[in-house]
Image: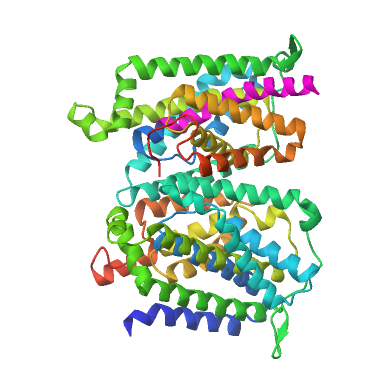
Amino acid sequence: MMRNLPAAALLVAALAIPLVFGGNGYIMGLMVSGLIVAGVALAWALLGNLGGMVSFGHAAFFGVGAYTSAILSAKAGLPVPLSLLAGALGAALCSLVMLPALRLSGPYFALAILAYAHIFKILATELSSITGGSAGFQRFPTLPTIAGIDFSSRTGSYALLVVMVALCALVYRAVKRSHVGTALRAMAESEDATRVVGVNATLLKSWMLLLSAFITGLFGAMNAHIINFLEPDYAFSGNWSVLPIIAAIFGGYRTILGPVAGAVLIYLFDQIIAKELLPVGHQILLGLLLAGMILVAPNGLFGLFQTRRKGAPHAAA
Amino acid sequence: MFELLQQSLFSGLLVGSVYALVALGIALTFGAMKIINLAHGELVLLAAYMAYVIESRTGWNPYAAIPLAFAVTALVSIAIYLLIERIREHRELNSLILTFAIGVILTNAILLVFASDVRSTNSPLLQDAVSLGSVYAMNSELLAFVVSLLVMAGLWWWLRNSWYGRAVRAVSSNRDASMLMGIDPRRVELAAFIVAGILASVAGVALYTMSVVQPALGPALTVKAFVVTVLAGVGSIPGVFCAALLLGVTEAMTVTLASSALQELVGMVLFLLVLFFMPNGLFGARARRG
């Protein structure tokens, strides 16, 4: 029972928020964006924890998911639920281009993926006949009303996102507990040794990259239909790489729910407190927070908590 | 058309020399510590803004800012080193995130202090064009090229002849063996970070004199430097220099033949091609990176 306590607490909080703040459009809007970041943070942590890879380029998946879904729903008339899926698949597809980078070791991979993010942003700006270029892309459908629930309303979007984040967390947990997860954990200890016993390390890492890109693209797509406006500088903004990293590190990237809780907290902190203190350059506070976390508690606040409770340094892994 | 190509070839070579300085800074700290300093682009940018401060406050030539820029970048570089030193677990990945965070802090600090406006030199002396046969260059570009070559020659000499330089090479090639030879790797790493600060300060000031700077430039510089190091393969100064010139020329050619918007893209494409077909880089035949 104790194991599921954090999950239960988060679920109660997720249910309580619309009951308390349901009428407050501002707070609900912040929560919706916070949950978008939470989904990306979850995907980032999955890649980091299971795949052992640090990515500085998740903005690429986010933007590709957003544009794919927006364009397909507007120009090909695809129903939005299907276009969301297409967006996620599009992001996974673009991660295929990054597979050669998996040959590179940790730091080189991280920088290669940063370079990829630049490429996709430039492409979105330059292919203006498809994406509308830097002028932006609008006039695409909002989230639909299904079974009487209007998903385009703030509360509707919120409910959808809570469900999606929970689903992704369950997928993450299933992968982590499967023998794929075991193999990946072994790989983190010693990649060469794992190869020797017949685990195809590169293949497993590729799957993690695909899955992480898929989830990120899905949230990018949902965000596009919630915001209903896209431009390259927004959809491929470095923020979609930076915020999830900070959220995941803050919450503990070796846990599943840490990044989720971290994302909402960090996003609210950034929007309500940091922006109030420093209208320009408010991300300096996030940078300081990230640096501080890495130095003081690299396993995150929730990781710190978990380690203490179980009293073993590897418990959080 | 031929004149245009000739001109872009020439300008690309001049810009490339500054890329080489930025890339060598990253390569040096990576060699000594096996850690990529993701805030290196921001260090260069910081130096460029010091040039702006000196020029706008005193009206002196931006190159007079090199001592100040060096003091600032060396201090920040030392601070980065001391912070990385404190990381105990998962050092490779955590240090990446840490330097990334420092990059975010520096970018936003520059934004806070200098606002998001683009800055460039207004010195007529530096902006004057000179013709060399059929090609033209700004004085600042020629000066940057000469200064970069001198600094690279200095670096080459330092790595080859000085005790610290040789120690940096020793630690880079085999840390354990160099410790057995009585080298304290921490002092050597610190030296590498300080020298990287020197390279960044010169590169930043040169960059300020020959183009425009803005707070968001840092990550782009880091990526460019990374592209150069991947192109060069395992670091030798001439290798990095050639790869940087190649990047500079490719970019300049793209601007001439296609559009300036694609300038950033072509470096990435070059980088991907090398990654696909020559994972050891253009000039590194043996060592394995992945």
- The percent coordinates of residue B289 (x first, y second) are 40, 41
Q: Is residue B17 magenta?
A: yes
- The percent coordinates of residue A54 (x first, y second) are 45, 54
Which residue shows up at 66% across the image and 72% down it? A84
Query: Is the residue B107 above or below the residue A81 in the image?
Result: above
Q: The magenta stretch spans which residues?
A: B1-28
Query: Is the residue A272 above or below the residue A111 in the image?
Result: below
Q: Is residue A16 left or right of residue B52?
A: left
Q: Is residue A214 left or right of residue A81?
A: left
- The percent coordinates of residue A47 (x first, y second) are 45, 61
Image quadrant containing the N terminus of chain A: bottom left
Image quadrant containing the C terminus of chain A: bottom left
**Along the line of sight, the residue nearer the viewer: A313 or B266:** B266
**Along the line of sight, the residue nearer the viewer: B111 or A150:** A150
Residue B16 position by quadrant: top right
Coloring scheme used: rainbow
Numbered-mark total: 0
Residue A18 position by quadrant: bottom right
Which residue shows up at 23% across the image and 66% down it? A312
- The percent coordinates of residue A203 (x first, y second) are 43, 60
Q: Is residue B54 magenta?
A: no
Query: Is the residue A67 above or below the residue B280 in the image?
Result: below
Q: Main secondary structure of the magenta part?
A: helix
